[in-house]
Image (cartoon, helix red, strand yellow):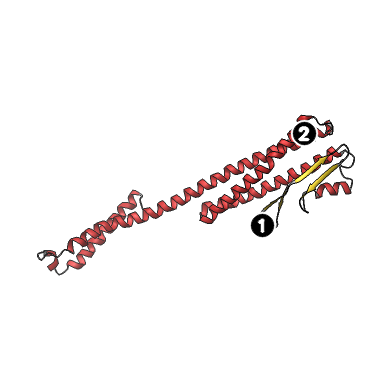
Amino acid sequence: MFSHHAGTRAIGAEQVGLVLGPNFLISFQEREGDVFGGVRDRIRNAKGHVRTQGADYLLYCLIDAVVDGYFITCDKLGEEVERLEDEVLTNPRPLVASRVQHLRRRAIFVRKAVWPLREVIGGLMREGSPMIRPETAVFLRDVYGHTVEVIETIESLRDIISGLLDIYLSSISNRLNEAMKVLTVIATVFIPLTFVVGVYGMNFRYMPELGWRYSYPLLWLAMLAIAGGMLLFFRRKGWW
């Protein structure tokens, strides 16, 4: 049985034991606070058939309350998945990746809790226990269908969470590619400039350009023209 703490995303879990007898039902819980409040209110206020039916119907009501709590858990997980989708697309930080992994572990934990209950309900319907009346077995089949629906929802959430990890890795790769593209363009622009500066940095005595009056500003103009021409070429090619 799952519980949710207000203000946090933590999922509390506890084991619940139900012992069905001919005319009684005993429930065991680990701590106070549960999802059985609605069933207690129906018993106190004599609402529905819970006070007129047998112990097997009460068993159904308690199991149904637990399964309804699973749907709330799935809704909470789905809301967090939606929040993480926006963060992964807009701001793929390492913290987001750790939250995705944590959410994935919680989804696996929920699935491990729900799967055995499906087998238990299926066993109650298949074995034909004399303590389960045919009219109650109809309700148990309904709970069984809800349990299968929860499992399918969890599986869908797991697929979406795995997709979030792929999106995160793709976003990080794209950002790295953008950074590498900028650095590559800068390095490419400086290659011919470095060549020009290297040529005129040689210590040869007879270099006619060194004696010209306007050699220095002309060299700067030439290097700026080379850099501007390369950037314009990159822009037209779509590389910048």
- Work out whether residue 173 or residue 2 is closer to the camera in this orientation and state it: 2
Q: Name the residue under label 1.
A: 8
**Mark 1 crowd level (few <14, some 14–19, many ≥20, 10 Å Cα):** few
Q: Is residue 42 left or right of residue 216?
A: right
What mark, if any, has residue 155 been given in the picture?
none
Question: What residue do we see at 44% from left, 53% from top?
Answer: 175
Question: What residue do we see at 64% from left, 49% from top?
Answer: 77
Above or below 237: residue 223: below
The image position of residue 176, as x and y in percent, is 42, 53
Q: In this view, does 163 lie to the left or right of 111?
A: left
Above or below 50: residue 195: below
Q: Can the viewer see residue 87 in this picture?
A: no
State the separation of the CA atoms marked 1 and 2.
36 Å
Q: Mark 2 points at which residue?
A: 124
The image position of residue 45, as x and y in percent, is 89, 48
Q: Please state which amino acid type lies under the numbered disc 2.
A: Leu
Q: Please state which amino acid type lies under the numbered disc 1.
A: Thr
Residue 153 location, quadrant = top right
Q: Residue furthest bottom?
A: 213
The image position of residue 154, as x and y in percent, is 64, 42
Residue 18 location, quadrant = top right
Tag 1, which secondary structure?
loop
Question: What residue do we see at 38% from left, 53% from top?
Answer: 180
